[in-house]
Amino acid sequence: MTEPASSPDRPAHESPAANPSDAVLPDVDLLVVGGGINGVAIARDAAGRGLSVLLCERDDIASHTSSASTKLIHGGLRYLEQFEFALVGKALAERKRLLRMAPHIIWPLRFVLPHQPHLRPAWMIRIGLFLYDRLGGRRGRGLPGSRSVNLRKHITGRPLRDDFVHGFVYSDAWVQDARLAVLNAMDAAERGATVLTRTACVSARREEQAWDVRLRGADGVSRRVRARVLINATGPWAVRFLDEVAQVPHRHNLRLIKGSHIVVPRLFEHDHAYIFQQPDRRIVFAIPYEHDYTLIGTTDVDYRADPSAPHIDEAETQYLCEAASRYFKRAIQASDVVWTYSGVRPLLDDESDAASEITRDYLLTLDREGAPLLNVFGGKLTTARKLAEEACDRLAPLFGGLGPAWTGTAPLPGGDLPDADFDAFHEDFSLRRPWLPDALALRLCRNYGSRALRIVESCSHLEELGECFGADLYTAEVDYLIDCEWARSADDILWRRSKLGLRIDAAGAMQLQGYVARRLAGWADIDVPAADVPAEDA
């Protein structure tokens, strides 16, 4: 589940020009609606090519689909069965780039596929893995190739039922999905883009040369902006945005698919993940998660309710418990689940009968019947950078040519580690700060990479990090998230910028929310340097 999610506010059919009291923002080249992975990636690419960019997101960055994925950077092994060779090759090439661009939040992960001959024959799996190894040029990042394993001797066979004897191991990568979106937004802002969170696009009037757009903040204040190009990157709301906000005719259709995950206490001690074949020919992953847990997912269920608030249902929980219990010696029960999350994937409706067989590729359409409108349909985390590059290439002729594509080699914030070597950076960071607890030092390095230095640079003792809210979360980190990453609530910090919500208690969460509220209220009374304030407040 990788697409952006920024829903338009309730339909607004008045003209943006109807209220002369609206604040007026400077004109921009691009207005991107949607703060999920596709929207922020486009904003980053365009800002880096010299365009003036404004991005608005109704909620928080990555607050919907882009923070509800299976947390993988992968080509999609199962897509080979659907002959999606181009998509898999493109995704695997992106995997190689992303491992170098953000080695702090993206790292290699080995997957074990226990073999069940009645589901897929061994020869089919071997051919698929042979292709998978080679489509993405794995050796460029040192990812080990696929191989067969004896599960009775290999460490990954220990948690599995005794009837699993043979398996296959291959490489892919893990990602902190919401952080990937936030880092793209940060880079866009640092290159000149304005990023407005908690700001809905409520109406857009098309003129011959520009869009006249009204934005509304969570405080009810409206602002107007004129943009030469409007980009619809609203994910599950893309069609609704065209119908109710932009009010333009179209022939597009999306199929909304809900994917749910469960988190249970750790089921195994090793660092490999599992990919489990199911009788319905779907696959389910079981992945090491946040050190003490196992993540199991995902489901594929047609969805017709509000994309803002999907929830796992009893049938999905049962499906995932049974899917894992077919393989592990220890049966998983619903009572084992400590957390769940669900997201809605907006997939191109290709009339496939099964939700799991719908293409995960994306479509970009450029409507030039008046001021240009670029629509983004579909996509996934892994290919968002490439999608953004293609989008900006499509727009280049409208601006008399832009700078060349640049994002394929530019690290994301915090990813500028020497030789993209996370382990060496983490070792040096920890050795220079023996006063930092090991677990905290690792988490800061993993979440922020080189930007972790900004959190601890003025400290020489743990107490200097400030108040502890629990789960090794201190004021210095919270201040950084508010000042640099648009965090505006405890949930932003505990469930998107981190997963500390799994560890912090209710009292600590309430204490954190109170601090965030006081800190934001204090901004009105203090002189904060513009360079230290996110773009929406500068």
Image: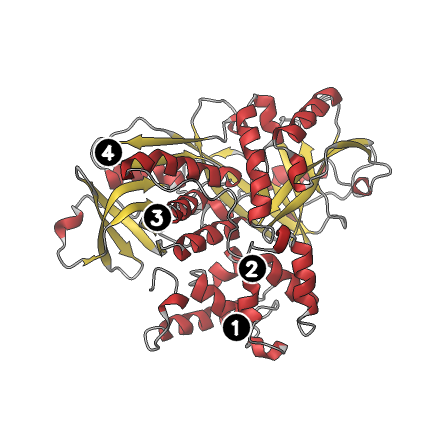
Write down the residue under mark 3: 50
Q: CA distance from mark 4 to mark 3?
A: 28 Å
Mark 2 and mark 4 lie on one chain; the one further toward the N terminus is: 4
Mark 1 and mark 2 lie on one chain; the one further toward the N terminus is: 2
**As drawn, 319 above or below 30:** above
Q: Nearer the viewer, residue 358 or 263?
A: 358
Write down the residue under mark 2: 448
Element type at marker 4?
A: loop
Write down the residue under mark 4: 248
Q: Which of the two marks, 4 or 3, is nearer to us in this view?
A: 3
For the rendered model, the colour scheme is secondary structure
Mark 1 and mark 3 lie on one chain; the one further toward the N terminus is: 3
Q: CA distance from mark 1 to mark 2?
A: 16 Å
Residue 186 percent coordinates (x, y): 44, 56
Disc 1 marks a residue whose amino acid type is Thr
Mark 4: few/some/many CA within 10 Å (<14, 14-19, 20+)? some
Residue 495 percent coordinates (x, y): 52, 57
Element type at marker 1?
A: helix
Q: CA distance from mark 4 to mark 1?
A: 47 Å
